[in-house]
């Protein structure tokens, strides 16, 4: 290999890729979109994870009473998170269908 040779020409720039335009959302869904992205649902899910981890740690240190309490709390947080998420999804879906049918 010789150091006196000329380098190859540079590569041409890549072609721009345009993403398809998303359809405009109705203005009425803006407040509902904030509800769907509410911090309440992840907070309930994180509580469920924390209490389920406490079950394992309390069982490891031979605390069956504490493990049962943490298990009940984890179960209740998991149920509440699922119920609230289901209600929000149903309300969002019904509202979306109703608004789409008006157009």
Image (spheres, rainbow, N blue to C red):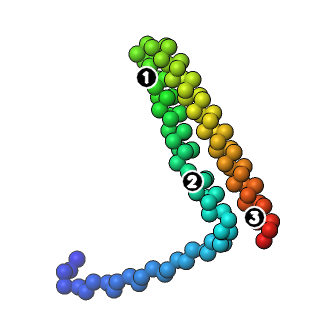
Above-or-below relation of 86 to 1: above
Residue under label 1, please give it. Answer: 57
Above-or-below relation of 83 to 73: below
- Determine whether the residue tagged by mark 1 lies in a helix, strand or loop: helix
- Determine whether the residue tagged by mark 2 lies in a helix, strand or loop: loop
Specify whether 95 is left or right of 36.
right
Disc 3 vs disc 1: Cβ atoms closer than 8 Å? Answer: no
Residue 86: image location, x then y, percent: 68, 44
Residue occupying the point 50% across, 35% down:
47
Residue 80: image location, x then y, percent: 62, 35
- Tell me which corner region of the image, top left, top right, bottom left or bottom right, holds residue 7: bottom left
Residue under label 3, please give it. Answer: 99
* Residue at the far right in the pictured view: 101
Disc 2 vs disc 3: Cβ atoms closer than 8 Å? Answer: no
Question: What crowding class fits label 3: few (fewer than 14 Cα within 10 Å), some (14-19), or many (20 or more)?
Answer: few
Above-or-below relation of 43 to 60: below
Front residue of this view, candidates 24 and 16: 24
Quadrant for the C terminus, please: bottom right
* Residue at the far left in the pictured view: 3
Using the numbered discs, state the Cα–Cα distance from disc 3 to disc 1 in whole angstroms: 49 Å
Q: Earlier in the sequence, mark 2 or mark 1?
A: 2
Using the numbered discs, state the Cα–Cα distance from disc 2 to disc 3 in whole angstroms: 19 Å
Callout in the foreground (2, 1): 2
Residue occupying the point 68% across, 69% down:
26
Question: What crowding class fits label 2: few (fewer than 14 Cα within 10 Å), some (14-19), or many (20 or more)?
Answer: few
Residue under label 2, please give it. Answer: 37
Callout in the foreground (3, 1): 3
- Determine whether the residue tagged by mark 3 lies in a helix, strand or loop: helix
Q: Earlier in the sequence, mark 3 or mark 1?
A: 1
Front residue of this view, candidates 55 and 100: 100
């Amino acid at each position: 290999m010789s150091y006196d040779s000329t380098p190859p020409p540079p590569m041409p720039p890549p072609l721009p890729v345009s993403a398809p335009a998303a359809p405009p959302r109705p203005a009425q869904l803006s407040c509902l979109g904030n509800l769907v992205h509410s911090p309440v649902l992840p907070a309930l899910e994180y509580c469920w994870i924390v209490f389920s981890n406490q079950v394992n740690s309390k069982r490891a240190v031979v605390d069956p009473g504490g493990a049962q309490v943490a298990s009940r709390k984890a179960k209740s947080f998991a149920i509440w998170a699922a119920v609230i998420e289901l209600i929000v999804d149903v309300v969002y879906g019904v509202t979306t269908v109703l608004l789409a049918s008006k157009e």
